[in-house]
Image (tube, rainbow, N blue to C red):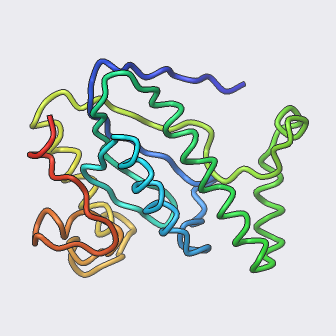
């Protein structure tokens, strides 16, 4: 049984991470990076700012700033995952990727299947850490911006060249697909 952690709205800024099911590179396989950018635009319209982000082939890190005090982080992330999952499944169906669709379908429990869920696109939980200081914010920004060139990842020659990240915005004043709100302009 999944245990949901309720995240407090005591802090206005959170470092959030969610992962594709079994660490599958579903964003890359389905070219669904655009779904994340659409979600970011939706958040802007709801008075929630994206301060920093990196969209990896199989997971997403983002720093969200909530301009209004009352919010439900679980609902914000849950809705994002649901919206993106529908689009990812639609793209897999269009590509007739039966093997992958079957693998995602096998991840559903009997209880979830009875509720109508057909595929597991993301891991059930997500990680969220409240950002309570400028130094912690900098640590998380450095971490997410370095992600595409760390460990096994070799997604760009230089971290500022990775197109699905806010690194270029912060380091060069330019961006690729989405312009975040600078952390100095919030709070």
Q: Is residue 72 above or below residue 104?
A: above
Q: Is residue 23 above or below residue 158?
A: above
Residue 70 falls left or right of residue 122: left
- Across and down, in percent, residue 46 comes to 40, 41
Tell me which residue sits at (41%, 26%) in the image: 71
Judging depth in this view, the residue of 38 and 108 nearest the camera is 38
Q: Is residue 6 above or below residue 42?
A: above
- Across and down, in percent, residue 74 comes to 51, 30
Tell me which residue sits at (86%, 42%) in the image: 116
Tell me which residue sits at (29%, 69%) in the image: 149
Q: Is residue 168 above or below residue 181?
A: below
Tell me which residue sits at (14%, 45%) in the image: 138
Count of marks placed on residues: 0
Q: Quadrant of residue 98?
A: bottom right
Judging depth in this view, the residue of 185 and 143 nearest the camera is 185
Judging depth in this view, the residue of 109 and 40 nearest the camera is 40
Q: Quadrant of the N terminus?
A: top right
- Across and down, in percent, residue 153 comes to 38, 70
- Across and down, in percent, residue 187 comes to 14, 34
């Amino acid at each position: 049984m999944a245990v949901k952690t309720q995240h407090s709205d005591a802090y206005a800024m959170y470092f959030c991470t969610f992962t594709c099911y079994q660490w599958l590179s579903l964003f890359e396989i389905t070219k669904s990076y655009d779904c994340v950018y659409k979600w970011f635009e939706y958040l802007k319209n709801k008075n929630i700012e994206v301060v920093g982000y990196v969209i990896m082939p199989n997971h997403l890190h983002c720093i969200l700033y909530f301009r209004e005090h009352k919010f439900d982080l679980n609902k914000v992330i849950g809705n994002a995952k649901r919206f993106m999952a529908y689009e990812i499944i639609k793209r897999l169906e269009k590509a007739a990727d039966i093997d992958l669709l079957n693998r995602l379908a096998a991840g559903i429990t009997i209880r979830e299947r009875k509720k109508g869920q057909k595929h597991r696109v993301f891991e059930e939980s997500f990680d969220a850490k409240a950002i309570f200081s400028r130094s912690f914010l900098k640590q998380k920004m450095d971490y997410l911006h370095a992600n595409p060139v760390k460990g096994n990842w070799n997604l760009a020659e230089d971290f500022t060249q990775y197109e699905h990240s806010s690194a270029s915005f912060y380091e060069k004043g330019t961006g690729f697909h989405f312009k975040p709100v600078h952390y100095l302009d919030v709070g």
